[in-house]
Image: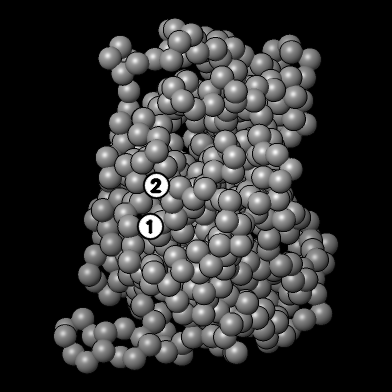
Amino acid sequence: MRLFTTIAGLRCFLALSRSGRTSLMEDGITHPIANSFPLSVGLVPTMGALHAGHLSLIRRARQENDLVVVSIFVNPLQFAPHEDFQRYPRTLEKDQELCQQVGVDALFAPAATELYGTPNIPVSEVLTQVIPPVAMITGLCGRSRPTHFQGVATVVTKLLSIVQPDRAYFGQKDAQQLAILKRLMTDLNLPVEIIGCPIVREADGLAMSSRNRYLSTEERSQAIVLYRSLKRAAQAFQHGKLLREELMAAVASELAVVPRVQLEYVELVHPDTMAPLEQVDDVGLLAIAAHFGSTRLIDNILLRNRKPILAIDGPAGAGKSTVARQVAQTLGLLYLDTGAMYRAVTWLVLKSDIAINDEAAIAEFVSQCEIILEQGTADREGQSPIPPSPLLALKVWINGQDVTQEIRSLEVTAQVSTIAAQPIVRHELVKRQQAYGRKGGIVMDGRDIGTFVFPDAELKIFLTASVQERARRRRQELINQGQADLTSTELEQAIQERDRKDSTRQVAPLKQAIDAIEIQTDNLSIDEVTAKIVSLYRQRLAELYGEQV
């Protein structure tokens, strides 16, 4: 790991790494490396005093990127004069050790002078600042910290400009910050993906924070009431309490147990816009801030009013697609057929006379197209709607045209892999897949559904089988098709090579989500695997909503 305190040093290191002129060796010597793909870079901005929450962000970045940069900078611009800028813990030596242990490549720890040209708190009159939308920064924490989010937006924009990462990682605990930064990327068209990561909690539920160390023993025992109050509201929500006043009452009943808590706010807002909500229609963020002595703590919980999403990942030949379709039929859910989406784009490209290797033209095209997958569709000519049924075939529409049959043509089949291999196509289609997920009730299979497409899926399955079993299944398929040219050994070697390639792909590598339930399918039939997943889904429904299913 390299430590940099200057912008020049970090930029030089990143430029050398991206050019393939340096590897990330521990000896500090430049080594040439061969790169067939551009290096992906993940940035984890922090203020130091690292704890397990920060480390979870770094580990996520390490999983998803070739190069990981962590910044440590106690940003004076986001502190008001009466706040704890001087007191904020600074533990650079310990932080270096932790970063080294979790595989950070470069640690950036600049002084204020390096970023702002002065060691003193910058003032707006002399410094260019980034000001997010007023509606997003005046509520919640913005009421008591009116200049905080301008300071956050400004320093993060500077860090993104310096590092130019592909992805930047932030914790869900700072939900208002997360929403503002996502909006910042959209409004300024910055090519960085903002990744929100789950809150990491102590064993008793207290959200991890660098400021927890300020708490006295008594205050620490009182502080867990924040999460208890949010959980009480979540339980009410699971039992059908969707209105703001109902959820507020649940929080208040738990807070009353600790009368010395100094409540700053409890709010129900939309997690993307921070707009106040009177009830939860699809999703809501219940956020709380309070003081324990002189220490201010925040916490939140997401409330989703949707059917659970079922994400099924696993290696090739494990039976994912067959099982996913059958599970969707059994449960009456939508099977999100990503293959059909890629085929629809391919059909549209072919019909538009765009060369299939003209990635720029395809990028412009796919970013504007509308794809709809329907199970039990309404008649497009205005006739009576057909009631949804899992037994009805999936219908595929693109730009208002039904292409269900056309996308299965030989012409489309011959070109779909070329189109699907283009990163911009995947990027745009993932956005559409995630849009389907807002209301839930879908089943989707792939390599990174639970880790990337739907990291918040309520149920994640990792379907796998031994190489030998997958080779046996593939050989039986070939025999049934009158093609038995490959031996079992050759098929096993081919499957092992496919697994290697899938797990080391630059885009969409095969990964098992940390919270996925692994199902080993050796010696199990399709019906048995389906029954097992259906049972797990129904158990999850009961846990979430108390439903007897």
The picture places residue 33, in percent across and down from the top left corner, at: 67, 22
Question: Residue placed farthest to the left in the image?
Answer: 382
Residue at x 74%, y 43% (from the top left corner): 217
Q: Which residue is mark 1?
A: 269
Image position of 234 (left or right of 156): right
The picture places residue 243, in percent across and down from the top left corner, at: 38, 72
Q: Residues within 10 Å of mark 2 (few under 14, many from 20)?
A: many
Q: How many marks?
A: 2
Image position of 12 (left or right of 192): right
Q: Residue type at mark 2: give it.
A: Leu
Image position of 264 (left or right of 2): left
Say which of 498 and 91 sits in front. 91
Say which of 437 and 114 sits in front. 114
Q: Which residue is mark 2?
A: 140
Q: Nearer the viewer, mark 1 or mark 2?
A: 2
Residue at x 27%, y 75% (from the top left corner): 402
The picture places residue 543, in percent across and down from the top left corner, at: 62, 77
Question: Residue placed farthest to the front in the image?
Answer: 259
Q: Residue type at mark 1: give it.
A: Val
